[in-house]
């Protein structure tokens, strides 16, 4: 299964997803899977869906950055 990390994070379950400068991410879908867990503060794309994961998630993946 291929996936990519998205440049962005959040501070908790109800916090917005932001870039490294604190600006809201402009490309979020209506639903982010696994987002009900406060420890899931990183964002990934798996196939055609977005998911929240915790910072300890490690695997080989692409990294998508906003330039």
Image: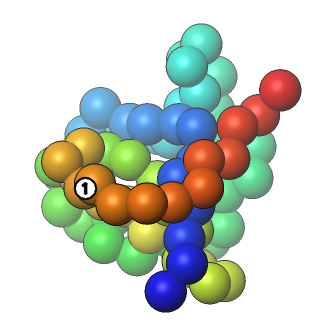
Which residue shows up at 75% across the image and 43% down it? 26
Residue farthest front in this picture: 60
The quarter of the picture where residue 41 lies is top left
**Mark 1 Cα-neighbour bin, 10 Å: few <14, some 14–19, many ≥20:** few
Q: Percent from the top left, x then y, of residue 48? A: 66, 83
Of the 4 image quadrants, the one containing the C terminus is top right
Q: Residue at x 44, y 69 (%)?
A: 51
Q: Does any portion of residue 7 appear in the rendered image?
A: yes
In depth, the one of 67 and 25 nearer the eye is: 67
Q: Please, is residue 9 above or below residue 58 in the view? A: above
Furthest toward the right, the residue is 67
Residue found 55% across the figure and 19% down from its top:
20
Which percent across, then down, holds residue 64?
Answer: 68, 47
Q: Residue furthest top?
A: 21
In the displayed structure, would residue 2 be above or below residue 6? below
Q: Nearer the viewer, residue 36 or 7?
A: 7
Q: Residue 5, how many percent across, how many down?
A: 53, 53
Q: Quadrant of residue 25?
A: top right
Q: Is residue 33 above or below residue 54?
A: below
Q: Residue at x 59, y 13 (%)?
A: 21
Q: Does the rendering let one see residue 13? A: no
Q: What is the total number of numbered labels drawn onto the structure image?
A: 1
Task: Determine whether the residue tagged by mark 1 lies in a helix, strand or loop.
Answer: loop
Q: How is the image coloured?
A: rainbow
According to the image, label 1 marks what residue?
A: 57
Question: Where is residue 56 drawn, in percent x and y?
Answer: 18, 48
């Amino acid at each position: 299964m291929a996936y990519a990390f998205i440049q962005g994070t959040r501070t908790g379950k109800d916090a917005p997803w932001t870039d490294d400068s604190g600006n809201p991410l402009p490309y979020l879908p209506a639903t982010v899977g696994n987002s009900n867990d406060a420890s899931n503060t990183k964002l990934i794309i798996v196939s055609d869906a977005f998911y929240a994961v915790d910072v300890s998630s490690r695997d080989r993946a692409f990294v998508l950055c906003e330039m």
